Image (cartoon, coloured by chain):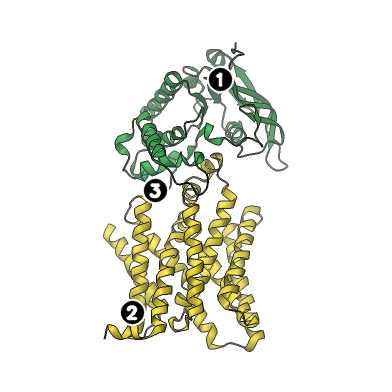
Chain colours: A green, B yellow
Amino acid sequence: MHDLTKEPLLRLLDTSFSYGSGSEVIHGVSLTVHKGDYLGLIGPNGGGKTTLLKIALGLLIPTSGKVEWFGKDIQKFKEWYRIGYVSQKATEFDSLFPATVEEVVRMGRYARRGFFNRITDIDRQKATEALQEVHMLEYRDRRISDLSGGQKQRVFIARALASEPEILMLDEPTTGVDQETQTQFYELLKELNERQNLTLVLVSHDLERIAKQATHVAIIEKTLRYYENPLEAIEKEQHIDHHN
Amino acid sequence: MLLSIFQYSFLIRAFEAGVVIALIAPLIGIFLVLRRYSLIADTLAHVSLAGVALGLLLNINPLFTAFGVSTVASVLIERLRLSKRVYSDAALSVFLSGSLAVALTLLSIAHGFSVNLFNYLFGSIVTVSQTDLYIISGIGCVVLVGVYVAYKELLYVSFDEEAAQVAGIPTRFINVLLIMLAGLTVSISIPIVGALLIAALIVIPVLTALQFKKSFKKTILIAEALSVFSVVAGIFSSFYLNLSAGGTIVLILVAFFVASLLKRA
């Protein structure tokens, strides 16, 4: 069971969503993410997992229900630097974009600085530390487009880490990443969760792999089924085609 | 011979105005190009023409009406684009030809076609008055300050709009700001390069600089250098060889671009 003294970071209350006047993509989803959790958000293609992630991040507004961050309604929540976001973009990236690894990671500090403010030495230092954490420091002066898919993914994680977030929300890329890269990606996440007690929400289609390292699993297939014990999810959700 | 060029005060004004425009055009251009907004530069140039026509009709300095009209249009373009009621390239096409139609109609109301229009279409360095130079420098400063203040937001939004939004950056405001700054840049570029060639000054130096595959900051610096060189060289050659300044400037830019492609091939 959840330790009730743990602070809830993210709470979704009975949220539903539909695009335009179409049928519902997700229905009546309630979900709480506590500090230190490593939640695998698993579902088949079209099951609504990316939609749910976007609702949580405020990129989509639910047709009904509530979203709360750190106990505050999402509409009033302003401290977005407390949340790190890693999109699928890492692998489908514009190869002409002129930016070095370091320039990309420093963007992660922008959320902590308002208009008019330039980045400071502290920001540069934090960006360096974030690169160290994902073992990419030696690539700092390389162009982001010259890196492999897995390396880009690490840089995008470093960008999210640079804002010193309390929770990392990741949308796992489904294409263009090989098995070995994938394994390294999971190892890095485990490291961040266990060593730094960083809260993680990982959107993925691969139930079997995630269940082996996440602390909790939620299956989203329009409605949500939550499992305190990830291994129980494997047993009960065998119909989920995890190879799609 | 070299000295003689500086005996003409109109030429000194042309150089001064030219350098201001050469500095700000790629600064706006890099964000437009990376955001796939290149065509907006051309559209805003045509919109500015409608503003110029309005100025000529009302007897107001056309530079003022040009950036008034292009600022209003830039907000409307972004709204139409966001409404998703039409494709965004089609929206641009409506504004492009629509504002040209407005320009033509206003001018025919005024006094038929005049030599003036030709100057605004293709630029004419002899027409830059002292007042124009003040306006161009003033607006140029506004654009510079605008980019300086919103630099990191513009960069983040160009790189990854969704992540920027999650980070709490007001992406809609930044998008409108970028298009408004582009509108200002376009309107003050009209006297030198002309409405039909402005897009080249905004887009081509950036495309050339991108071929060097450098960091973001270095890419901007390369684009700036190319742009300033081309404008200065273009004005020089237009004076000595009696060629159109706008035409020569753009041809030099294109030459650099082709060379950068060949270098990599």
Quarter of the image with the N terminus of chain B is bottom left
Residue B265 seen anywhere in this rendered image of the structure: no
Query: Which chain is disc 1 placed on?
Result: A
Q: Is residue A50 above or below residue B225?
A: above
Q: Is residue B131 above or below residue B211?
A: below
Q: Secondary structure at mark 3?
A: loop
Tag 3: residue type? Ser
Q: Secondary structure at mark 2?
A: helix
Q: Looking at the rendered structure, which numbered label has been put on residue A130? A: none
Dot 1, crowdedness within 10 Å: few (<14), some or many (≥20)? many
- Residue at x 34%, y 72% (from the top left corner): B252
Q: Are marks 3 and 2 on the same chain?
A: no
Cα separation between marks 3 and 2: 37 Å
* Residue A159 location (% of width, % of height): 43, 37
Quarter of the image with the C terminus of chain B is bottom left
Residue that carries the numbered disc 3 in the rendered image: A95
Dot 2, crowdedness within 10 Å: few (<14), some or many (≥20)? many
Q: Is residue A160 above or below residue B125?
A: above
Question: Which of the two marks, 3 or 2, is nearer to us in this view?
Answer: 2
Query: Which chain is disc 3 placed on?
Result: A
Cα separation between marks 1 and 3: 35 Å
Dot 3, crowdedness within 10 Å: few (<14), some or many (≥20)? few
Q: Looking at the rendered structure, which numbered label has been put on residue A217? A: 1
Tag 2: residue type? Phe
* Residue B114 location (% of width, % of height): 56, 88
